[in-house]
Amino acid sequence: MPPDVRRAAGERNRGISQNALEGTVIATNQDYGFAVINIGERSGLTGGSRLIVRRGNQRIGTLNVSSVSANKTIADIEADSLTPGLAVSPGDRVILEKVQR
């Protein structure tokens, strides 16, 4: 397989795996406005990503990834994205906001 085809296939496969990327909020600090997520670089998450926070079928808000380690991520809670009366909490699920094609 030519190198350019191999590279394109690798990029496509990474995009597909990112579309299925899902994690869980494991801790929050409401005073400083951030959440800790149980996925990181090993799962394919990168700095600058945006995550949608869900609880069941309800969208809670959006997070901006600020720091990524191998297995954990720190993300800033977008206060203006939160559903009124709700807060991001441990156990909430996160998915990538912008899917890769």
Image (cartoon, rainbow, N blue to C red):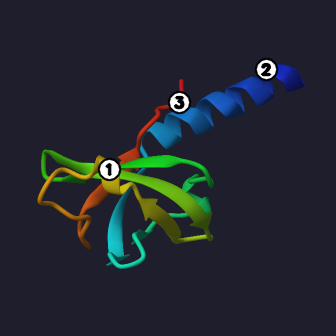
In the image: residue 40, left or right of residue 9: left
The amino acid on which the numbered mark 1 sits, given as a three-letter code, is Asp
In the image: residue 19, left or right of residue 31: right
N-term-proximal mark, 1 vs 2: 2
For mark 1, what is the residue? 80
Nearer to us of marks 1 and 3 is 1
Q: Residue at x 15, y 53 (%)?
A: 84
The amino acid on which the numbered mark 3 sits, given as a three-letter code, is Gln
- Compared with residue 30, is residue 5 higher up or lower down, i.e. above or below? above
Q: CA distance from mark 1 to mark 3?
A: 25 Å
Q: Nearer the viewer, residue 29 or 9?
A: 29
Indicate the position of residue 88 as horizontal and vertical percent values: 26, 64
For mark 3, what is the residue? 100
Which type of secondary structure does the marked residue at label 1 adopt? helix
Nearer to us of marks 2 and 3 is 3
For mark 2, what is the residue? 5
